Image (cartoon, grey):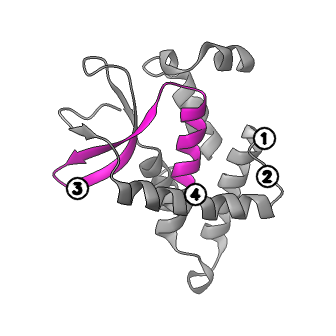
Amino acid sequence: MNPPDVPILDLTQEQEDALNTSMETIWHLLEMMGVTPEQPGDILSGCEALVQGWKAASAHERPDQGLLIQGLGGVVGCMITSVSTFEWKNAVDEDGDTPCLVAGTDKDQVILFPIDSVAKRFDSEVEKPLWQYFIGVVDDPNTRACFKPEFLESIG
């Protein structure tokens, strides 16, 4: 969860714009499915349905995988930021830079990579549905303190 010595910067304007554009596409698809932002469980189920729909489609019928991964990771990440102290940032390493979620101080920093977590679901590396990723982040002892008390109370 915390890569050693990974510089964390603010998102670039280009990253922010790409993330917002891809999330708008996902929100449009979710709205077509009848999902609204007020239904967190439905959002995660809808996102998972998009992953499974992509997997089930033939190669020539599939929408752009990169756009879906970034958009779905963005939506899941925004669900996390809305109920926690996590913020979108930019992790930079030898392979390039990646949007990530960061909470805590430099000494006690917690880093999540929701876009990378979604990408693993497309490659069948991870078979768990997205709601399990979300719950796993909430329940993880390393991240639980980053969530707002009122959110934790609301889920029991």
| Percent x, y of residue 138 | 56, 25
Q: Are marks 4 and 3 in contact (CB under 8 Å)?
A: no
The residues bearing labels 1 and 2 have C-alpha atoms spaced at a distance of: 7 Å
Q: Residues within 10 Å of mark 2 (few under 14, many from 20)?
A: many
* Residue 8 visible in the snapshot: yes
Residue on which the image places disc 3: 96
* Position of the N terminus by quadrant: top left
Q: Answer with mark 4 or mark 3, whichever residue precedes in sequence.
A: 4
Q: Residues within 10 Å of mark 1 (few under 14, many from 20)?
A: few
The residues bearing labels 1 and 3 have C-alpha atoms spaced at a distance of: 35 Å
Residue on which the image places disc 1: 39
Q: Answer with mark 2 or mark 4, whichever residue precedes in sequence.
A: 4
The residues bearing labels 4 and 3 have C-alpha atoms spaced at a distance of: 22 Å
Q: Tell me if residue 111 comes above or below residue 58 in the rendering.
A: above
Which amino acid, mark 3? Answer: Gly
Q: Residues within 10 Å of mark 4 (few under 14, many from 20)?
A: many
Q: Tell me if residue 116 comes above or below residue 133 in the rendering.
A: below
Q: Answer with mark 1 or mark 4, whichever residue precedes in sequence.
A: 4
Q: Is residue 85 left or right of residue 131?
A: left
The residues bearing labels 2 and 4 have C-alpha atoms spaced at a distance of: 14 Å
Task: Assess whether residue 68 is covered by the magenta stretch.
Answer: no
**Magenta-colored span:** 72-100
Q: Are marks 1 and 3 in contact (CB under 8 Å)?
A: no
